[in-house]
Amino acid sequence: MAAAGFSDLREKLKSMTPHRDDVKNKFVDGTTSNGSGMSHKRKHRESDDEHSDDNAELREQEARRVSSSIQQKSIFTPEECVLIEEKIDEVVAKAEAGLYRQHTVDRAPLRNKYFFGEGYTYGAQLEKRGPGQERLYPKGEVDEIPNWVNELVIKRLVSEGVVPEGFVNSAVINDYQPGGCIVSHVDPFHIFARPIVSVSFFSDSALCFGCRFQFKPIRVSEPVFIQPVRRGSVTVLSGYAADDITHCIRPQDIKERRAVIILRKTRPDAPRLDSDTSLRSSAERHVPLKSKRSHRRADPDAAHRPRVLEMDKEENRRPALPRQRPRSISSENYRRRDEDDEKSRDTSGRKVKMRRH
Ligand SMILES: O=C(O)CCC(=O)C(=O)O
């Protein structure tokens, strides 16, 4: 599903304000200022239109590239979803009881994460921030993948041919409350092999590609592509969708509680913190595990109320360049990402301030 870009929005606005066309027509009809029978303004307008046509075409092309590198399957029945959702609730309860290892649980307002099998440092946890700086925790610093994830989810993905046996060694559960989000990022190339597989639970939502976030108040630019992620569906990202464009979950797309289980394989050569560094930085941060309870009760209206989100730590998981830059690197998104650090332009050409990472 290709989302309408700003140029389409302009068309929409035009149709909502027909008097503007009258103004334009008057201007065109009444002006012959450059000897060509066409005003400078008129000329400018035409080249603007050409530009926005070009942009729209590029966005369409990019949307097609994203779409063709996503596979989706509706695998889990509503009954199976209920069973798995009960298990997710058990994980939440166990975390609230403080029964997991420290790095298994990462809490943020409106979004909690539970890492199993492998965990890694990202975002504000990084001493040295930026793409490519993520590190796996030493083995054993997060809890093992729970049996139910293996039995109810991974085995099923294997039998459906989604992943080969033995592929998954990392399972992350994200639990979102209404209005929760994950800012635009690419899953770090040096940590995770492709594909990236995820299964959605509790409610339907949308995974967006190519958005840029602005903060305070939070604002998300128009996506290049929107992939619905329905309860019980499996989404597989590879190629362009995984490597060449960022993905995110926008706050407006989490209207009810939603959870996702992300199933990945870490690369054998992924860099790993040594135990000493990990222990030292944990002690320095001194994260109180139980006191910061942010698994708030779902409020059905919350998603519709304006709020300032304390941003997800994953905001720092911005794309690093892959080891081998794919040919498609000339993509608009890569350019945008390079520009993102301080100020960037959104697709309407305005300058938007981006967070420095
Ligand atoms: O919630 C989702 O479907 C995507 C989550 C995601 O991209 C991530 O946690 O890295």
Image: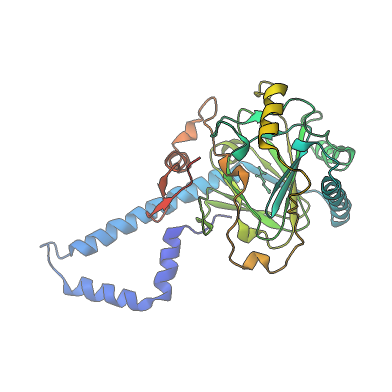
| Residue 254: image location, x then y, percent | 67, 59
Type of colouring: rainbow
Which quadrant is the N terminus positioned in?
bottom right
In the picture shown, does residue 150 fall above or below 32? above
| Residue 20: image location, x then y, percent | 33, 75
In the picture shown, does residue 274 fall above or below 28? above
Q: Is residue 314 left or right of residue 73?
A: left
Q: Is residue 80 left or right of residue 276?
A: right
Q: Is residue 187 left or right of residue 10?
A: right
In the picture shown, does residue 179 fall above or below 94? below
| Residue 79: image location, x then y, percent | 88, 55
| Residue 152: image location, x then y, percent | 87, 43
Point 57% across, 44% down: residue: 315
Point 45% across, 41% down: residue: 341
Q: Is residue 274 visible?
A: no
> Quarter of the image holding residue 317?
top right
In the image, 302 versus 274, the foreground residue is 274
Q: Is residue 126 visible?
A: yes
Q: Is residue 32 left or right of residue 216?
A: left
Point 55% across, 34% down: residue: 129
